[in-house]
Image (spheres, rainbow, N blue to C red):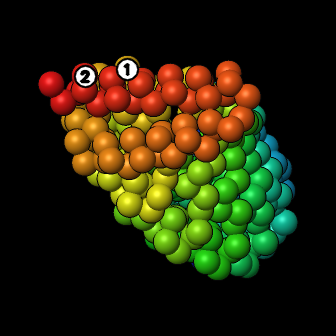
Amino acid sequence: GASKRKKRPPCAAHRACHIPSFRVGAFNFMIMNSQDLISFAKLGELDCVNEIIAAGANLEHRDEKDQYGSTALIAGAEHGHLAVVQRLVNVKAQVNTKDTKDGGTAIYWAACKGHFSVVKWLAMEGKASVDIGNNNGSTPLFISAQTGHIDVVKFLVNQAKAHVDAALKTGATPLVIASEKGILETVRWLVTEGRANVSTTLKSGHTALTIAASFGQLDVVKYLIGVNASIMAETPDGNAIETALKYHKTKVAKWLAGENIKVGLHYSLGAFFCECDRPPFRCVRVFVRLCACVCACVRVCV
């Protein structure tokens, strides 16, 4: 009689994902569904992904095993599996679908984890939007600046033409978040090559400089002063020196007071004399600011 055809053994991800199975005679059969598509996408098991797609899985099924509600495409992108991402997009998975918790897209999560090849392919071939923000307004550029993935930052600005000053709902830009985190390489590149606005003001009134000062990021503070960020910009916490003092960042405060006291006094004196021919209350207000600046500098230096 005819020899029996040998059934191909289940892929390795079967064991890793604990897919239910049943046995008939000498053969094992896996019970696979749309949830398994997400599990295999996370693992980068392309053969299994192809099998489940061929069986008619729902490409937009949401992950039932975690709180994010990711699709298979988001899961594959977040874990850096380019071949899986390419396959899912090519069979018409929705490229700009957001997860249900934070509202991040596939390219957003790839950028967050620094998966450069996935980010590049999604933007250039998959036609993913690089300017869609999550629920807080964070874009792929913002999150890559926050996490220090400079290669992704450069690509998104130079080739994908991402908006370099796209802001969160709070007004924070990629430059602001990189300044807060003290990622000097990213800060420098965003300013010199990306042409990011160093004077952007958050809704709170803070700037990249005062944010860096409040977090004690001295190297970033020095750089921003060097590219003409205003040391005397008004914020709810005062100028950069006063902000550093408020948050007990003494190294930053001492440097600002010691190395840039002339800049601060020059600014305040200039403003004072310019206001002398204006209504008296404005003159008094600027004079008070001048005195406050002097007192702050003296307080740090003594």
Q: Which mark is residue 39?
A: none
Near mark 2 (Cα within 10 A), the count class, few <14, some 14-19 or many ≥20, is few
Q: Nearer the viewer, residue 40 or 11?
A: 40
Residue at 71 percent across and 35 percent down: it is 278
SS for callout 1: helix
- Residue 151, x across and y down, in percent: 46, 70
Residue topped by disc 2: 299
Give the CA separation, mark 2 to mark 1.
Answer: 12 Å
The total of numbered circles placed on residues is 2
Q: Is residue 102 left or right of residue 177?
A: right
- Residue 268, x across and y down, in percent: 48, 39
Residue at 61 percent across and 58 percent down: it is 197
| Residue 259 visible somewhere in the drawing | yes
Q: Nearer the viewer, residue 97 or 268?
A: 268
- Residue 90, x across and y down, in percent: 78, 73
Q: Earlier in the sequence, mark 2 or mark 1?
A: 1
For this orientation, the residue located farthest to the left is 302
For this orientation, the residue located farthest to the front is 277
Q: Nearer the viewer, residue 223 or 193?
A: 223
Q: Quadrant of residue 83?
A: bottom right
Residue 107 drawn above or below residue 279: below
Residue at 42 percent across and 36 percent down: it is 240
- Residue 172, x across and y down, in percent: 62, 42
| Residue 202 visible somewhere in the drawing | no
Residue topped by disc 1: 246
- Label 2 sits on what residue type? Arg
SS for callout 2: helix
Q: Quadrant of the N terminus?
A: bottom right
- Label 1 sits on what residue type? Lys
Near mark 1 (Cα within 10 A), the count class, few <14, some 14-19 or many ≥20, is some
Q: Quadrant of the C terminus?
A: top left
Residue at 62 percent across and 29 percent down: it is 283
